[in-house]
Amino acid sequence: MRRHRVTYKPTEVKAAKVFCQDREKHLEVIEKIEKMLHLARYMVCNPEGNINSELIDLVVSYGGDGTMMRAANLHRNAIIVGINAGHLGFLTAYNSNEWEQFFVDLSESNLFYEERLRLDVALHTQSGMVTQSVFNDVYIKHGENPRLLNLNVKINEQNASTVGGDGIIVSTPSGSTGYNLAARGPIISSGTDVFAITPICPHSLTSLPMITSELTRVTFVGPSNAEAYVNYDGVKHKVRLRPGDYIEVKKSSDFSKIIPPANSVFEALQKKMNWSTV
């Protein structure tokens, strides 16, 4: 895992933004955070976006894991720190009552960010190819008419599995505690350089998750009257797949800069979901 210290120099002016999907609900605390950023010599981007997103150095994500995921996708060059105002908060470094501690850690140069794996996804259809980068996951799933989908998985051009079920999730380590976990996929340590391929409700006891770092192709085999859609980081793209359409997934040369929580994901699971307790 590659970790880097977050450098803080009071004489150096940098750009920052508070990212929140429900700003009005949390306006009081957001304004306090923005005031502290000003005092820390950050030029704060307003909600209308007065600063180019590519020039923002630091994003304070106030919300849950979904908010942090969207912040990481919108601000690829920035360091992302999460303050949890949601439910679980696997990705967030601070709880909502700890936001002041963030500024203490920042001023003391006591912060590090991790380089988190992203995935490049190429969707190949009869209309052409569309590319996308994801922080959490990409999955193919049935539409509103829940018909069984047949999906073929190739890893590094070798047949790995053919799955009959509701779909397939391809997840990064950061996304492994999201939809992947709900589908009983593996939990992957955040610093690793691999991703998970997890069937969704497979109609076979032998269809099991896989972990790889190689180029992966998932092809929609059929049936032709089934609806299948591709979703990137939980956003549905209304592109109905035809038999033969496929996605190719590989590790991105890009990465997200995430300030991690002090506790590991396994400690968070034990504390918040009573995981592996006796």
Image: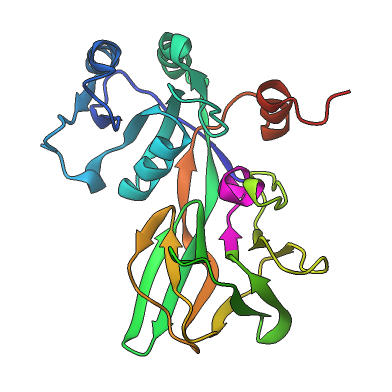
Q: Quadrant of residue 159?
A: bottom right
- Left or right of 56? Residue 236 is right
Placement of the C terminus among the 4 image quadrants: top right
Determine the residue positioned at 69% across, 27% down. 273
Describe residue 99's horizontal placement relative to residue 263 as left or right. left
Question: Picture coordinates of residue 65 (x, y %)?
Answer: 47, 35
Confirm whether the magenta stretch covers residue 57.
no
Residue 106 sits in quarter: top left
Q: Is residue 136 above or below residue 104?
A: below
197 with respect to 57 (left or right): right
Q: Is residue 170 magenta?
A: yes
Q: Which residues are magenta?
A: 169-181
- Count of numbered badges drawn on the protein: 0
**Quadrant of the rendered image containing residue 242:** bottom left
The answer to whether residue 21 is above or below residue 55 is: above
Which of the two residues, 32 or 66, is positioned nearer the viewer here? Answer: 66
Task: Report if residue 151 is visible in the image.
Answer: yes
Q: How is the image coloured?
A: rainbow
* Residue 190 in the image, given as x and y percentages of width and height: 63, 44
State left or right for residue 84 relative to residue 24.
Answer: right
The image position of residue 210, as x and y in percent, is: 74, 64
- Taking depth in this image into account, of 102 and 227 the one nearest to the observer is 227
Q: Residue at x 70, y 21 (%)?
A: 271
In the picture shown, does residue 7 fall above or below 126? above
Between residue 13 and residue 144, name the one nearer to us.
144
**Which residue is located at x 35 percent, y 41 percent?**
71
- Res 1 seen here: no
- In the image shown, does 251 or 187 lie closer to the viewer? 187
User: What's the residue at 52%, 20% (across, down)?
Assistant: 110
